[in-house]
Amino acid sequence: MEKTSQKQIHLAKRPTGMPDNDTFGFKDAPVPEPKDGEVLVRTLYLSVDPYMRGRMQDTESYVEPFPLNEVIHGGVVGEIVQSNSTDFKRGDTIVGMLGWQEYSAVPAKAVRKIDPDTAPITTALGVLGMPGLTAYFGLLHIGQPQEGETVVVSGAAGAVGSIVGQIAKIKGARVVGIAGSDEKLQYLKQIGFDETINYKTDNVGQALKKACPNGVDVYFDNVGGEISDEVYSLLNKFARVPICGAISSYNKAGEDLGPRVQTKLIKSSALMKGFVVGDYSDRFEEGTRALGTWVKNGSLKYEETIVEGFDNIPEAFLGLFKGSNLGKQLVKVADPLYAKA
């Protein structure tokens, strides 16, 4: 490898409200030299995810905030271009939580080898990665859908929501998806959703009552806000509500105020439980195996929106909050030098 310099993206300032281009700082840096026990990874694909918005705030959460003026980190699929570890060789394809940069030198234990012959390498950041595992454990461990029950999914055309709906169908449930464009609703129908609602053009409350005449047994909540307020009114006795995200409020400058949910939960004896995928880290092998089987036999389909070019990473990230992506949002940074595509 002859390249000696690389691009990096740092957190330049903490955003108030919606991030913008000033939130991100581009810098040039030397390509690092791996130490003993380390590998040098060339970034091929990079993941942008809504949870990263929370890490841009200097507030206490389930994960540390991004430091100012340092490289932002997220999911990366890359190839080993230099190895000082017996666990990897040049050309191996890996996945790990690495920096928004073209090259990373990290301990070998910080990355995991993936097999390009099993599935496209991008799936390690999507259906067979964090989003797929989030859908799997959130729905099956908390939601526990039963055959014939009604499952409602908000953010249904996203990387997590689209998988949630399909797993619910595999389990025999009736599935209603909420998304923000006719194109996304058409896609949801194609992958098996029974009913769809466009929250931008439909009266969500009325549409939900029509789509869920027997109420809601499981609500997988990716968005929070007014959409979720409408769903809570339809919860059946002993309904389950996995709380995965609240993207509608991530860029609000003040408090996200709305109707109180306690009375509705009491009346329905419903369970509402927040979670992060790391809660199930000791069961990731189980989840990956199940997801892989469903993908292989065709019962679980996935979509990816891929933006090309390192310089377009901020644009891809900001697009998450505009609903620009269908399925998993990725950025293609480079073609492999040695590994299979």
Image (tube, rainbow, N blue to C red):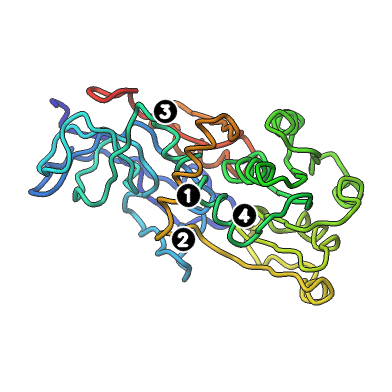
Do callouts 2 and 1 mark residues in contact (Cβ within 8 Å)?
Answer: yes
Amino acid residing under circle 2 = Tyr
User: Going 58% across and 50% down the picture, which residue do you hit?
Assistant: 18
Amino acid residing under circle 3 = Pro
Q: Nearer the viewer, mark 3 or mark 1?
A: 1
Alpha carbon separation for disc pair 1 and 4: 12 Å
Do callouts 4 and 3 mark residues in contact (Cβ within 8 Å)?
Answer: no
Q: Which mark is residue 139?
A: 4
Quarter of the image with the C terminus is top left
Alpha carbon separation for disc pair 3 and 2: 24 Å
User: Going 54% across and 37% down the picture, which residue do you hit?
Assistant: 294
Residue named by callout 3: 120
Q: Residues within 10 Å of mark 2 (few under 14, many from 20)?
A: some
Q: Residues within 10 Å of mark 4 (few under 14, many from 20)?
A: many
x, y percentage for residue 264? 82, 71
Residue nearest the viewer, comparing 134 with 7: 134
Q: Secondary structure at mark 2?
A: helix
Relative to 149, residue 26 above or below: above
Do callouts 3 and 1 mark residues in contact (Cβ within 8 Å)?
Answer: no
User: Going 58% across and 32% down the picture, which residue do you hit?
Assistant: 301
Q: Is residue 297 left or right of residue 129?
A: right
Q: Which mark is residue 98?
A: none
Q: Earlier in the sequence, mark 2 or mark 1?
A: 2
Alpha carbon separation for disc pair 3 and 1: 18 Å
Q: Which mark is residue 287?
A: 1
User: Going 60% across and 66% down the picture, which residue do you hit?
Assistant: 274
